[in-house]
């Protein structure tokens, strides 16, 4: 199971009742955060989730509304008695940006590991999360992220018995470990079926529509995408500022064949985003306006 929480849904500046856009995911005791604008700590606290398990923090880009909450968050994680390293992931220049922000958070009881993205698309495996970072089109270098939780195939007990593998070794094979018995080595693929469908979430903010978004969101269980503008007549403004309209996000969801679309990263002028959802359902039906604290529990399919 993968828990995902949309901590905030505001773009540009936090508003009363609407924190800046950030996403937190939890899997197998590990938490992953995407973006950390001003107020992210409060949003996590309001949700009631813990700071200590945050192992990974990914950044889409380095505009203030996506990273200005980092120094305070790092200090809070430190105050939670964490001593294990925290991995930071973001576009090229991450080390320099983090060093500058840490002027006001110089002492931490844990190590920070920075992973700088330099290619149009990069794969990372961290704490059970299979991450794909893909470059999008904003006014500065910016990435979207796909989080995948893979699922192993079924264990074939009959085949294990026919190979005369002792039952006490089955668990190790199920968890991908090679075993040896009576001088014979057994590999997991000898007793495991084909990998089953896992869980997939794609997150993208601050971009014009580009084909790489739909390509990386293909078949996602949940697609969380910016909808800076919901009102009619905002198309030119979206193009000028390198953002998206509700309709453009819905078109990407349709092209990608995702199961569900949550919109986020609203303009401060968009007071009631839900009022504009009906107008895009002809493009993609299973769409809703994300709200602060909205959570989903994504389960493996039987």
Image (cartoon, rainbow, N blue to C red):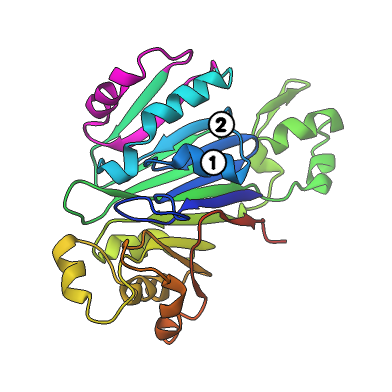
Q: Nearer the viewer, residue 74 or 104?
A: 104
In percent of width and height, residue 32 lies at: 50, 39
Given residues 127 and 237, the one toward you in this image is 237
Whether residue 283 is visible here, answered yes or no, is no
User: Helix, strand or loop at disc 1?
Assistant: helix
Give the quarter of the figure containing the C terminus. Answer: bottom right
Image coords of residue 189 (percent x, y):
64, 42
Residue at screen point 17% across, 47% down: 140
Q: Disc 1 marks which residue?
A: 44
Mark 2 Cα shell of 10 Å, populated few (<14), some (14-19), many (≥20): many
Are circles 1 and 2 on residues that touch, CB within 8 Å? yes
The residue at 44%/78% (across/down) is: 275
Left-right relation of 16 to 136? right
Dot 1 or dot 2, earlier in sequence: 1
Tell me how far mark 1 sits from mark 2, CA to CA. 8 Å
Q: Residue at x 45, y 30 (%)?
A: 73
Query: Viewed as shown, does residue 58 lie left or right of 234?
Result: right
Q: Quadrant of residue 243?
A: bottom left
Tell me the SS state at disc 2: loop
Q: Is residue 13 visible to the viewer in this orientation of the structure?
A: yes
**Vertical arrangement, residue 105 with respect to residue 29, above or below:** above
Tag shown at residue 51: 2
Q: Please say if 143 is above or below 178.
A: below
Quarter residue 36 falls in: top left
In terms of depth relative to the viewer, which is nearer, 103 or 220? 103
Q: Residue furthest bottom?
A: 282
The stretch in magenta equals 83-111
**Residue at left 31%, top 66%?**
269
């Amino acid at each position: 199971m993968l828990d995902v929480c949309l901590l905030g849904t505001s773009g540009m500046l936090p508003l009363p009742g609407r924190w800046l856009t950030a996403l937190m995911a939890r899997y197998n005791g590990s938490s992953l955060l995407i973006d950390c604008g001003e107020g992210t700590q409060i949003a996590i606290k309001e949700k009631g989730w813990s700071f200590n398990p945050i192992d990974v923090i990914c950044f889409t880009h380095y505009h203030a509304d996506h990273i200005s909450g980092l120094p305070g968050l790092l200090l809070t994680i430190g105050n939670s008695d964490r001593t294990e390293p925290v991995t930071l992931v973001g576009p090229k220049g991450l080390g320099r940006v983090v060093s500058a922000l840490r002027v006001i958070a110089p002492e931490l009881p844990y190590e920070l590991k920075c992973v700088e993205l330099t290619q149009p698309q990069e794969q990372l495996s961290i704490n059970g999360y299979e991450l794909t970072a893909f470059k999008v089109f904003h006014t500065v270098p910016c990435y979207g992220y796909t989080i995948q939780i893979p699922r192993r195939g079924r264990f074939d007990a009959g085949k294990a018995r026919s190979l005369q593998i002792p039952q006490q070794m089955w668990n190790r094979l199920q968890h991908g470990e090679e075993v040896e018995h009576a001088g014979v080595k057994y590999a997991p693929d000898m007793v495991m079926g084909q990998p089953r469908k896992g869980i997939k979430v794609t997150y993208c903010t601050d971009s014009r529509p580009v084909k790489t978004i739909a390509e990386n969101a293909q078949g996602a269980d949940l697609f969380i995408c910016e909808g800076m503008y919901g009102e009619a007549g905002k198309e030119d403004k979206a193009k000028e500022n390198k953002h998206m309209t509700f309709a453009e996000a819905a078109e990407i969801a349709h092209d990608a064949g995702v199961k569900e679309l949550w919109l986020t990263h609203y303009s401060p002028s968009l007071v009631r985003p839900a009022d504009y959802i009906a107008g895009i359902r002809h493009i993609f039906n299973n769409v809703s306006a994300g709200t602060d604290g909205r959570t989903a529990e994504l389960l493996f399919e039987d």
